[in-house]
Image (cartoon, grey):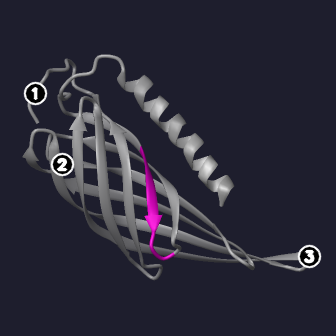
Amino acid sequence: MEKKIVWIASNFKTFCAFFWILTSYHVKAQVEPPTIMPGLAATYSTKLEVTGINARLYYAADHHYCFGPEVSFFKKDTEEGELSLFEANANLHYILDLKKGLGVYPLGGFNYTTETETKDLNETEEKHTENAFGLNIGAGMHYASGRILFFGEYKYVVSELDDHFISVGALINFSLAKKEKEIPH
């Protein structure tokens, strides 16, 4: 348990330093769409009762629609061995602006999940893998501060491997427009 806390603390510092370096140049109130937004999040699986990592890359055509792929990985040690979960998603958000920088969004999309249970039986190892396709439904909230977009999100995966996920993370906003402009959000 102590090793996990130290690992999370050291990786959190690296995560913060990475975002500070990337956003310390040309910070503006908002960037002109279209934009591309890479990001990372800590995500919690209620089924496995473990926190994993989520990486995403979103494309925003305008200030309301954004979509993109994301992947998440979870690993949990059990008495018999370990349980791991990998999920790949393609999601669409429709952002409703509440006030400057603050927005909420419903999300929907497609999911592919692989769950692998590895059991250590004496000197042999037994693996059992399940795969499932599904649908994502959920909602989130974000706050834009300069080029950084902080978000919190709930997602339910409807499939044979149903699960609820809660994610908290940040994205960095890079404009693909020819010229960046400051615009209100």
| Residue 42 image offset from top left, x and y in percent | 45, 53
Amino acid of disc 2:
Tyr
Query: Residue at 54% across / 59% down in the picture?
Result: 73
Query: Residue at 19% across / 57% down in the picture?
Result: 105
Of helix, strand and loop, which one carries label 2? strand
164 with respect to 30 (left or right)? right
| Residue 173, magenta (yes or no) | no
Of the residues tagged 3 and 2, which is closer to the observer?
A: 3
The relative height of residue 136 versus residue 6 in the rendered view (above or below) is below
Q: What stretch of residues is rendered in magenta?
A: 40-47
| Residue 41, magenta (yes or no) | yes
Question: Do labels 3 and 2 touch, CB within 8 Å?
Answer: no
Disc 3 crowd rating (10 Å Cα; few below 14, some 14-19, many 20+) is few
The relative height of residue 134 versus residue 8 in the rendered view (above or below) is below
Number of on-image labels: 3
**Which residue position is annotated with label 2?**
65
Disc 2 crowd rating (10 Å Cα; few below 14, some 14-19, many 20+) is some
Of helix, strand and loop, which one carries label 1? loop
Of helix, strand and loop, which one carries label 3? loop
Counting residues from the N terminus, which is met first, the one under dot 3 or under dot 2? 2
56 with respect to 52 (left or right)? left
